[in-house]
Amino acid sequence: MCQSKFTLKGIHRERTTMSQVVSFSLFRFGSLRARIWAFLMMGLARRHMSKIEGIDFWKLCGSGSGEGFTPLPNTSVYAILATWPDEATARRAIENDPLFQRYKDTASEHWSMFMSTDTARGEWSGKTPFIPTKHNKSGPLVALTRATIKPSIAARFWRRVPNISNVIGQDPNVIFKIGVGEIPLLHQVTFSIWRDATQMANFARTGPHAEAIKAVRSEGWFNEELYARFTLLSDIGTWGGVSPLAKVDTA
């Protein structure tokens, strides 16, 4: 298993023993049997998830095909997002909890990231799950957007997504990106890792993404939305044979 824990050049991360940590775990399933198992666990795993020691907010998600930001499902990739009181608790659960262990044993590959929250606004299922933590905000960051799309405008929303997906897929400042969701077509989450806040902001202010944001505001596309930024702390496992964070310069 590949494991990396990095400190970016010139940056000292202040850590406390009890600061909320967000985990984002991806699992890739190869065989048809494994994919069926993963699909069924979207419902069957819910009972156990709420009983995991230290877990607070959590979501089981499927993923999109292609760059991930599409309405077409990718039946081989599933995700689990969760919040924990600290990184030690998060790592202990993901490394040792029977449910996470079963996911890892069934998957052909898995990768988990641990993050602290820079900023967050909005709600997810009526809750405010992410607690901002004081730390250095320089260097690579994670951007997460989540929205409940109004059924009446779903077709209009998904017509815009391919243009955004193509642009973000070609952007050299994007270290990693994927789209996941709880309910196909209506509940969508975008997750991307950027080299720095400036590059991410430049992307958000121009092109198809900026046009979509304007439409969201003027036409009221979403019933619920949340935007959050995170600082990367560490990761466990691989994706595509390596840790995507290997692209980040380390000291």
Image (cartoon, rainbow, N blue to C red):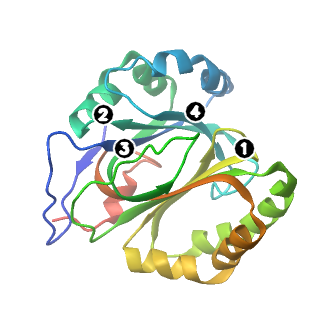
Q: Residue at x 50, y 82 (%)?
A: 202
- Image quarter in which the N terminus is found: top left
Q: Are marks 1 and 2 in contact (CB under 8 Å)?
A: no
Q: Looking at numbered disc 3 in the image, what kind of residue is underneath it?
A: Val
Q: Residue at x 60, y 17 (%)?
A: 44
**Residue located beneath label 1 in the image:** 73
Establish if 207 lies above or below 14. below
Gap in Å between the C-alphas at discs 1 and 4?
14 Å
Gap in Å between the C-alphas at discs 2 and 3?
8 Å
Gap in Å between the C-alphas at discs 4 and 3?
23 Å
- Image quarter in which the C terminus is found: bottom left
Q: Which mark is residue 90?
A: 2
Q: Which mark is residue 205?
A: none
Gap in Å between the C-alphas at discs 1 and 2?
28 Å
- Nearer-N-terminus badge (1/4): 4
Establish if 106 lies above or below 200. above
**Residue located beneath label 3 in the image:** 22
Percent x, y of residue 171: 53, 76
Percent x, y of residue 121: 48, 58
Q: Looking at numbered disc 4 in the image, what kind of residue is underneath it?
A: Phe
Q: Looking at numbered disc 2 in the image, what kind of residue is underneath it?
A: Ala
Disc 3 packing (10 Å; few <14; some 14–19; many ≥20): many
